[in-house]
Amino acid sequence: MTSSHMLPLVPAISDSFVAMRPSPEALIAGPCALPAAPLAMPPQQIEPDLRFSTRIARLLGRRADGSLGGTT
Amino acid sequence: MDWLAHPRGAVLIALRILALGLSAMAGLGAFVLFLQFGQADGLQILDVVRAVLILISTLWLAWGAVQALIGLMTLPRAPRLEAGAPIKGATVVLVPVYNEDPVSTFSRVAAMDASLAATGESARIHFAILSDTRNEEIAAREALVFAHLVDERDGLGRFFYRRRINNIGKKAGNIEDFMTRSGAAYDYALILDADSLMEGETILQMIRRIEAEPTLGLLQTLPRVIRARSRFARAMQFSASFFSPVFARGLAMLQGRTGPFWGHNAIVRTRAFAESCGLPALRGTPPFGGHVMSHDYVEAALLARKGWLVRLDDDLEGSFEEGPENIVDHAKRDRRWCQGNLQHARIIGAPGLRGWSRFVFAQGIMAYIAPLFWLGFLAASVAAPLFVPPPDYFPEPYWPFPYFPPSEASKAIGLAIGIFGLLLVPKLLIAARAALLGHARDFGGSATAFASTVAELAFSSLTAPVLLAYATRSVFQVVLGRDGGWPTNNRGDGQLGLIEGFIASWWIVAIGASGLVLTYFLAPGLLFWLLPVGLPMLAAPWLISWSSKPTQSHLMRVPSETSLPPVVALHDRILTRWDNAFPAPDNARTEPASATGRSPAHA
């Protein structure tokens, strides 16, 4: 009876040695992929807030500060 | 003299006041002289406008000159720290690439790794190639050459490669993507450009310095330009090697805690960078909105805003980059920088920034709009005679003798001499000091260094009108809302023919010719004075072509040409070998394989 299973090819001891190198794609996807070590990088405020509502709020805030300053 | 080399507190404030005060005095002096000159034939509105324009222009020139004069006062000094102290933290060297030739770029990584290995230091230093390459063919070549790099340098576990699916945020986005993915794995990140090269010992020094100073968020080196071949590139290389260190010394003395970041050849503390430098896109569309183009200045300002120290250590040698080989490539790069710097007008008012950071933004903007003030001054000067009333030689009725208004030409000549002095004197002083201190030896000796200085002055005077024309056009393009995009690199050898020069500069010729003709008819007395500006503009195609040709002149020799820095020599050897292993595709390069035949790979 013949087996239907195929045995994997094993190099013979007499075969010349060939180093098993992963393909460039395998290298990049595997051992040379960036390590997973996330670091939060929150977006910073890099523009002055020139919206009208913000200016009014700021102005009112300043007035409130000023009135407090005047009473003490 | 450490208090002066690295001034702090009251000394720093006094130095800044002195620098700004001297510049303001020069500007005001020019303003007053010009008004006196204009008064000779009766003061017109246009005279006042011209006086204001000359005030701004002179102030700007003087600011550059004062920086050099301050820089001449001290020599770079290394900060005191334990030599050879063991390095504890982990460092990653980030190499962002964008459609560059991977053989050229990755062989630099191999050279830096070999240079590090030669130091015998066992610090944990990894390399990460962060590809934003859009071209599939180049990307495939990147993978191939990267595998070779890993193999040759036995780099498994030390070398990493990642290609982004999209290139949001361009270089800043590329670095940010790394930080958010892998930043926590490292204490420090050395940020490079595709054309950066650094000695292993310099990298170790940078790590030791950032490790020794816990508040140091960013440490910038002064990269030297190497491998220039054309007349234009060699002039830039000489300037960067001979003059720039003195200007940088001045800058380092004035920086305080808010030094510069030039985007590469600098090390950052990853935690500081991540918590401070997340850059959102600016509201609106490019050129003023969208992603921040000149992100480096902004990142330096944001680090300083969070209290981190940002420092330029100009004493560090062994930091190299390459530059454009011709005027057109230079103008292309400058177009991008112009847009980036003008975009800072949106950021200059951001809350919480340090005063000096805002001043640096203003300087960056001024660097590009300064030519407009000169242009305005020239245009107003040509138009001025149209508005001058005819001279009245008999102002007193019934007085028989004519009255000749006093000539104030001496004031104008004095002013012109003063302005030329601001341009020439700092460079001549730098040459004199190099001769006195013996630094000129590395530049071919005192006589050669002095001749090179004169040659560089002549060369920069010839090319300045052409470069200013390009800068002016860039400003107009940005203001009119034309986005410069992100042009890819020139992969040729950088040589340009006369026809290519003409195609790139016909409009400069047209403006120069029109300007001279207009001056001849409107203000013939000014024609002689305008020739130094007009003639180079007429000759722009020839200048572009001539300056792009290679030269091996003894003039403008730099130390890296006479004695090759070890890491550059290493890179040359590796590159020549790799070039033969990975011949360039026909469409990518026409040059024979040789290390010195490389075109610059400016991202």
Image: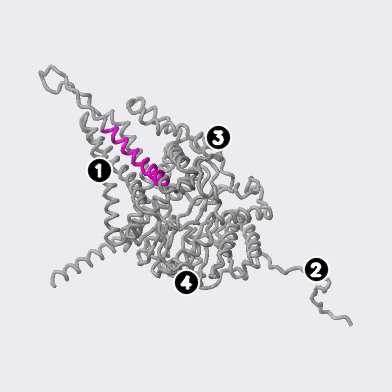
Given the current orientation, which residue lies at the most extreme right position? A1
Report which residue position mark 4 lands on.
Answer: A39
Q: Position of residue B546 (x, y in %)?
A: 53, 36
Q: Position of residue B29 (x, y in %)?
A: 25, 41
Total numbered labels? 4
In the rendered structure, find residue A16 and report the number of the disc placed on it. Answer: 2
| Display colour scheme | one colour
SS category of the residue bearing label 3: helix
Q: CA distance from mark 3 to mark 2?
A: 59 Å
Mark 3 and 2 residues: CB-CB less than 8 Å, in contact? no
Lower position in the chain sequence, tag 2 or tag 4:
2
Residue B132 on the magenta segment: no
Report which residue position mark 3 lands on.
Answer: B499
Q: Which residues are magenta?
A: B411-434
Q: CA distance from mark 1 to mark 2?
A: 84 Å
Residue count near mark 1 (Cα–Cα under 10 Å), binned few <14, some 14–19, many ≥20:
some
Q: Is residue B596 shown above or below B98?
A: above
SS category of the residue bearing label 2: loop
Q: Is residue B389 shown above or below B229?
A: above
Mark 1 and 2 residues: CB-CB less than 8 Å, in contact? no
Residue count near mark 2 (Cα–Cα under 10 Å), binned few <14, some 14–19, many ≥20:
few
SS category of the residue bearing label 1: helix
Q: Is residue B357 shown above or below B592?
A: below
Question: Which mark is nearer the camera, 2 or 4?
Answer: 2
Q: Is residue B376 shown above or below B146?
A: above
SS category of the residue bearing label 4: loop
Report which residue position mark 1 lands on.
Answer: B28
